[in-house]
Amino acid sequence: MDNSSGVGVLDKAALVLSALEAGPATLANLVASTGLARPTAHRLAVALEHHRLVSRDLHGRFVLGPRLGELATAAGEDRLLAAAGPVLARLREATGESTQLFRRQGDQRICVAAAERPSGLRDTIPVGATVTMLAGSAAQVLLAWEEPERMHRGLQGARFTATMLAAVRRRGWAQSVGEREPGVASVSAPIRSSSGRVVAAVSVSGPIERLTRQPGRVHAPAVLAAAEHLTGVLRTAEDG
């Protein structure tokens, strides 16, 4: 059966990815399993590594990269977003504050769902808004469990530190007070895929006057419960 698409470089890249489906491979393994010339196999594997579709293990062997997991997670995003509306509404009712769901998009994070406090002073972040990854509790959550190299890059210019991210990983949630915007506090927790990778953050945000300067003490349990519920939804969508 001819599996050619007519686009040679893509067909060869697909051969490399298919070969790695069986597990870690040296360059010699890739050459043997794909039938590609050694320079071609090496060039393609390195190019795929640049785009994080291929990575390396501790022994320097080629393995499937984290970007594939991110794309697979994005395929289940509709299920996550469908469930997010009611969950964010319940979280808003439980806390009395505006709630949001954020996903990382390059060097920014985007609000993909929200439930605003209906009246009074509130933090308004409309759906579709892009927000900095350099400040805020959701940014901390989306960066805290990243690969070391990406985390190091993400910390450059950030208003939080590696020590703060270590604390986020230890307790499982993040808080910020006047970090993204003066007078605003927030609490966020991670949503994970079936592989355990953090793919989104659920947040509560509002004025410091109501959330206090230790907002996690007030709202962390409710935010964690919402994040755990959405993690379960996403894992069911992926497993199904």
Image (cartoon, helix red, strand yellow):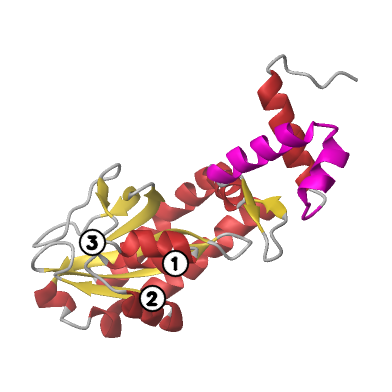
Disc 1 or 2, which lies upstream in sequence?
2
Q: Residue furthest right?
A: 1
- Asked which quadrant contains residue 156, the reply is bottom left
Residue 97 to residue 33: above or below: below
Dot 3 surroundings within 10 Å: few (below 14), some, or many (20 or more)? few
Residue 221 shows in the view: no
x, y (%) of residue 73? 57, 49
Image point (72%, 14%), residue name: 6
Mark 1 to mark 2 CA distance (whole Å): 7 Å
Name the one closer to the observer, 49 or 129: 49
Q: Which mark is residue 53?
A: none
Tell whether label 2 touches label 1 (CB within 8 Å): yes
Image point (44%, 77%), residue name: 169
Relative placement, left or right, of 49 versus 168 is right
| Region in magenta | 23-50
Residue 226 shows in the view: yes
x, y (%) of residue 208? 12, 74
Disc 3 or 1, which lies upstream in sequence?
3
In the rendered image, residue 37 lying in the magenta stretch gets the answer yes
- Asked which quadrant contains residue 155, the reply is bottom left
How many discs mark residues in the rendered view?
A: 3
In the rendered image, residue 24 lying in the magenta stretch gets the answer yes
Q: Secondary structure at mark 1?
A: strand
Kind of residue indicated by mark 2: Trp
Disc 3 or 2, which lies upstream in sequence?
3
Q: Secondary structure at mark 3?
A: loop
Dot 1 surroundings within 10 Å: few (below 14), some, or many (20 or more)? many
Kind of residue indicated by mark 1: Pro
Mark 3 to mark 2 CA distance (whole Å): 21 Å
Q: Which mark is residue 157?
A: 3
Relative placement, left or right, of 95 versus 194 is left
Relative placement, left or right, of 120 versus 171 is left
